[in-house]
Amino acid sequence: MPNTRVVITGMGVVASNALGLPAYEAALREGLSGIRYYDKLKDLKFGCQVGGIPQGIEELKKTYFSEDRLLAMNSSMLYAGIAGLDCWRDAGFSDPQENDSIDWDTGAIIGTGIGGADTMCEIVAPQVTAGNVRRLGSSMVEQTMASSVSALVGGLLGLGGQVTTNSSACSTGTEAVINAYYHIKEGRSLRMLAGGAEGSSHFIWGCFDSMRVLGRGFNDRPEQASRPMSASTGGFIPGSGSGILMLESLESALSRGAKIYAEVRGGHINSGGQRGKGSMTSPNPVGVQRCIKDAMESAGVQPSDIDVINGHLTGTMADPLEFENWSAALGCSADQFPLINSTKSMIGHALGAAGGLECVASVLQVSHGFVHGSINCEDLHPSLVPYHKSIVQKTIDHETRLLAKASFGFGDVNACVFFQKWTR
Amino acid sequence: MQKEEAMAKVLEIIGPFSKNQEAIKAAAPSTRILEDLGVNSARLVDIILAFEDEFSIEVDDAAADKIRTLGDAVDMIVQKTGK
């Protein structure tokens, strides 16, 4: 593998608790929840009637996209488009014009977990079932194909590198960042936009509600509903949005005088094979621990180098297991455990967008010297009490040298990436 | 329906699909929908559906395929609504 260093030079975010980077950082620091109660979920007899939906998109979208583009954009595309354009601008590039030349040196890996379920369920299924195929119009494929989010961003920005969508359930966004890292390291592109997007759809959330994995006990207190690491959590809270990062070779970033948020030190992706304790919906601990260890090896770091873990930590029974896996992989006792937090405590679990949104949160923390608090875990899960000194409940100033971000997903898939404070 | 009225409604429908708003302002019967107005060819399907809804007409594929200019669209609409 060539000795190319890869850095982060831009970020864009559409989250349930904030739109745009400055607001997102402020929300993370303040412990601002984006979870709200929705009448529609109650009317449809959902057990979980709260969720995370980015606010103010209807007004904002008109300032980002032309009228003809908006005619063919569902919620995941809106989120990806806004986050992608913000990331591009934040990286120091001017807005592309329709007739501009193509940027052959930049590509995109923007993943999604479910895709355009709102379009498929609200338009395609009822129209086709009613025999009205002819009335679907021309834009159903581009809104329901898995790659709709990356294709949109590629077209908006005139990208000439590989433009693709990955999908690995809840590890999607983090997987995209790691894939982009290796893509640049191998010299296939100078820059890659990477992250994830997930739309807001009760059709998506209903499938999880039926599995009884969503939290149902806090419908009357939505801001307290997402409770990773707490004793009182009853499941995760569904979310949506998009987080996209610009990964760039250090040489390219320095040559154009780009600002550098952090360095991607390395990462690893694997699967537990759905063997042992693993299944379609449960992680095999052997696979998780191996992923963390192999990520450390790829990054050339030791367990003692890790200051902070931004966990997957969704608010399900898997939270304690995640701690066990980290402890085993790092070979550390509870009192040696790194600081750890859960961004999902504020924005819920944004599925295919979670890794992107949480990688943006991770890089902001490394770059700006803070570790955000995890809200709603005052009553720590009994298994996690031994780790209480490591679990950050209130935001602290902290100069992080190395942060580990991990995501795990259905299919027994794992992804772990390391972000390092930028120094020459 | 008169041609002027049909033209106004056609422009209202096609306007959002056009990448060339200057050409919309200067539109004439000879204006070509794809080449001059910069409409994505895939969107012709949506425009035809909008014509059907707006004018309560049915436009089969053969009739739709003949539409190249704003004038073609207006003539088709006037013919189908004119009774």
Image (cartoon, rainbow, N blue to C red):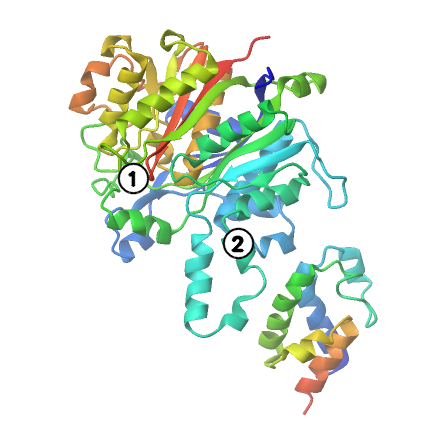
Q: In this view of the protein, which residue sits in the foreground, A197 or A169? A: A169
Question: Which residue, given by chain and number where applicable, does mark 2 sit on?
Answer: A143
Q: Residue at x 61, y 43 (%)?
A: A64
Residue B62 image position (x, y, % from top left): 68, 79
Query: With respect to residue B58, does B8 lie above or below?
Result: above
Residue at 55%, 12% (x, y): give it. Answer: A422
Q: How many marks?
A: 2
State the quadrant of the C terminus of chain A.
top right
Q: Quadrant of the N terminus of chain A?
A: top right
Quarter assignment of residue B24? bottom right
Q: Please state the horizontal and vertical placement of residue A58, each as a whole percent of the image.
A: 52, 49
**Residue A383: % across, % down:** 17, 22
Instruction: Point out the tag, 2 or 1, that comes first from the N-terminus.
Output: 2
Return the x and y of residue A90 as percentages of the image width and height.
61, 28
- Check disc 1 and give the amino acid type: Pro
Cβ atoms at labels 2 and 1 below 8 Å apart: no
- Can residue A399 be seen here? yes
Q: Helix, strand or loop at disc 1?
A: helix
Whether residue A391 appears in this view of the structure is no
Q: Is residue A51 above or below residue A294?
A: below
Look at 59% across and 15% down and name the residue there.
A3
Residue lying furthest left: A382
Q: Which mark is residue A406?
A: none
What amino acid is at disc 2? Gln
Report the side of A298 relative to B30 (left or right): left
Find disc 1 in the rendering and name its residue.
Answer: A222
